[in-house]
Image (cartoon, grey):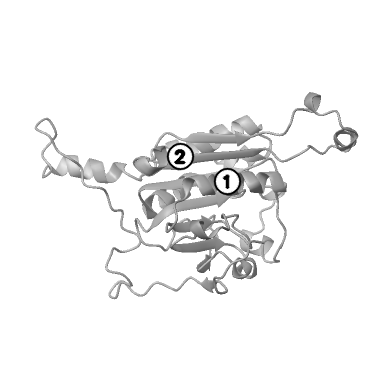
Amino acid sequence: MFSSSRPTSRPWPTLPSPSRPPFKTHHPFILLLPKLSTSPSDPSPSSPSSSSSAAAAAGSVRRLVLTPEGRTKLNTLPDREFYSFPRFVTHVDDGFIAALTELYRERLRPGAHVLDLMSSWVSHLPPEVQCRYGRVVGHGLNAQELARNPRLDHFFVKDLNRDHHLQLHAQSFDAVLCAVSVQYLQSPEKVFAEVFRVLKPGGVFIVSFSNRLFYEKAISAWRDATDYSRVRLVMQYFQSVEGFTQPEVVKKLPVKADDDQTPLHGIMRLLGFSRSDPFYAVISYRNFKSTNEMQ
């Protein structure tokens, strides 16, 4: 576990009634759009048709990726019940965790406001001082796990398969993370649209995964798919929401069997174990990729 000087995580405060907003910003369920530049060839900004079509497009779900069958799970027990018992373990190996931490180090700037979606007792954020973030909010299904996470300033518990709305302000986060959990979302298109809403323009959404899963709780479209198909599936989730940039794919695969002739690897192969967990991440930005990210 990373060392941290932060206090024990606190539950995310309940938003006040709309008559008394907590910040001088916007209601958490109103979509805010960046101002559109106009030119002589552009439709007049006062045109009702042009403004309504733009408002309907940005952040909206363009198409559904999954079929009804593809959203089903073998275990239909409510997720809050399935995850009610805390699991203080990591579900991927050290190689995967190191790759994920390095990716966060590269893509998240110090001082960023971060939402760790579908989190647990560890967030795998870089531990060094220069990578401290302005605020880290965690979401998950088990309060005990989230309370143990030293990187979270606040957390909230919510079943996104029952209610995909995030009770968070629009354009309030620089980065949203989802580590080894995307396979459990039954309405990923709607959740990705909510992530788009809470991201600031230029904000990044990093979705990472391996080949490990709670098989009975993963959706049908994911369970028996190949790793390549899973990468394509997450890319399609991003592409289903208007306004995300073209998804990037980062991968780190285990050493090929033919390249490793050690006795230990031979024994692991006989037992059905791979040398390490494959690492995949699909990354996209709201509206644009900032110049800082491209350097």
Viewer can see residue 30 = yes
Q: Pick whichever, 171 or 150, lies toward us.
A: 150
Point out residue 133 in the picture as x, y percentages from the top left corner.
Answer: 47, 60
**For the C terminus, which image quadrant?**
top left
Viewer can see residue 230 = no
The residue to which callout 2 is attached is 238
Point out residue 272 in the picture as x, y percentages from the top left corner.
Answer: 84, 37
User: Which residue is found at the position 48% from the left and 70% from the top?
Assistant: 12
| Looking at the image, residue 249 lies above or below residue 138 | above
Q: Which label sits on residue 261?
A: none
Q: Pick whichever, 270 or 183, lies toward us.
A: 270
Q: Amino acid at mark 1?
A: Glu
Q: Evaluate if marks 1 and 2 touch, with contact meaning CB atoms under 8 Å apart.
A: no
User: Which residue is found at the position 27% from the left and 68% from the top?
Assistant: 24
Between the C-alphas of marks 1 and 2, the distance is 23 Å
**For the N terminus, which image quadrant?**
bottom right
The residue to which callout 1 is attached is 102
Q: How many marks?
A: 2
Mark 1 or 2, which is nearer the eye?
A: 1
Residue at the outermost top position: 258
Q: Amino acid at mark 2?
A: Phe
Of the image marks 1 and 2, the number of the one nearer the N terminus: 1
| Crowd band around label 1 with a 10 angstrom C-alpha radius: few (<14), some (14–19), many (20+) | some
Point out residue 130 in the picture as x, y percentages from the top left corner.
Answer: 49, 57
